[in-house]
Image: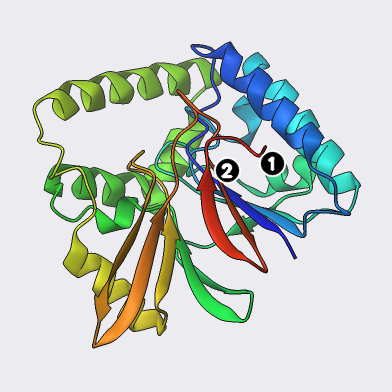
């Protein structure tokens, strides 16, 4: 049993080299060796709706379809950049869309998966924005706009987010440990895997007197960050090799 976890690939027009690395990575995965692939959010730099896929997305969509056609289960979780991934994307790629958070059985150990942005509770501005764009009414209005209008809105939001991010401390944009423990406690787990913060690491701590761990996936801007879990345990690597 070998299960792979990745997140924060951020496929988009600004970094075509990431798309090349990502599609090459998918091509190396063999269902004879790998049991499942989990993508925990932000597969795309921006996703404005299933009817608005851009030319830079085509190769990744085709590569995902080729992989699932081989019989490998691929699960995709919404991130803060691609929370509008929907049924059409799932049908075109053969991927399963995951709720956030969700508990899976990982080698006989219940493990909580999340993109991670829900845990950044110190970033009050972001949490307010997240609540707004996740509301069904906002999404309905947004998707009713033309593709060109949606692209413009997405660029505007991204620019504003970058400006605000420069004014925030790294601590504010990281996960809140109390929020981490609360989510893990609510789901009855002692292991959490998430992305979003782009800070790959394994954090060990005590949860209600028991050993617990939080595994953070890295982004793909500088490295092909992959978490490999098999009979020997889970380990973070910069690449699959």
Foreground: 155 or 239? 239
Point 50% across, 33% down: residue? 144
Residue 148 to residue 40: above or below: above
Q: Secondary structure at mark 1?
A: helix
Which label was assigned to residue 140?
Answer: none
Question: How far from the left and from the top, in percent, is residue 23?
Answer: 72, 27
Indicate the quadrant where residue 197 lies: top left
Q: Are marks 2 and 1 in contact (CB under 8 Å)?
A: yes
Foreground: 73 or 50? 73
For the C terminus, the quadrant is: top right
Foreground: 110 or 92? 110
Answer left or right for 77 relative to 152: right
Answer left or right for 135 relative to 73: left
Point 22% across, 50% down: residue? 127
Residue 187 to residue 23: above or below: below
Question: How far from the left and from the top, in percent, is residue 125?
Answer: 15, 43
Question: How far from the left and from the top, in percent, is residue 159?
Answer: 27, 18
Point 46% across, 19% down: residue? 151
Residue 60 to residue 120: above or below: above
Point 19% across, 58% down: residue? 176
- Residue corresponding to mark 2: 85
Q: CA distance from mark 2 to mark 1?
A: 6 Å
For the N terminus, the quadrant is: bottom right
Foreground: 91 or 38? 38
- Residue corresponding to mark 1: 89
Residue 221 to residue 87: above or below: above
Q: Residues within 10 Å of mark 2 (few under 14, many from 20)?
A: many
């Amino acid at each position: 049993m070998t299960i792979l976890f990745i997140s924060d690939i951020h496929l988009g027009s600004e970094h075509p080299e990431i798309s090349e690395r990502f599609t090459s990575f998918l091509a190396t995965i063999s269902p004879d060796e790998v049991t499942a692939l989990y993508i925990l959010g932000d597969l795309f730099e921006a996703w404005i709706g299933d009817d608005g896929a851009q030319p830079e997305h085509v190769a990744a969509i085709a590569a995902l379809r080729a992989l699932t056609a081989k019989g490998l289960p691929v699960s995709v979780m919404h991130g803060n950049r691609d929370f509008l991934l929907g049924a059409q994307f799932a049908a075109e790629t053969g991927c399963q869309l995951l709720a956030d958070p969700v508990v899976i059985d990982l080698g006989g150990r219940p493990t909580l998966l999340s993109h991670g942005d829900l845990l950044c509770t110190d970033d009050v501005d972001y949490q307010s924005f997240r609540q707004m764009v996740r509301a069904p009414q906002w999404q309905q209005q947004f998707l009713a706009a033309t593709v060109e209008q949606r692209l413009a809105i997405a660029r505007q939001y991204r620019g504003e987010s970058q400006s605000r991010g420069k004014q925030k401390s790294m601590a504010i944009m990281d996960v809140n440990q109390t929020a981490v423990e609360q989510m893990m406690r609510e789901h009855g787990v002692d292991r959490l895997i998430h992305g979003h913060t782009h800070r790959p690491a394994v954090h060990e701590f005590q949860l209600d007197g028991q050993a617990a761990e939080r595994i953070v996936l890295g982004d793909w801007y500088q490295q092909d960050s992959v978490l490999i879990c098999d009979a020997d345990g889970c380990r973070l690597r910069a690449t699959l090799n």
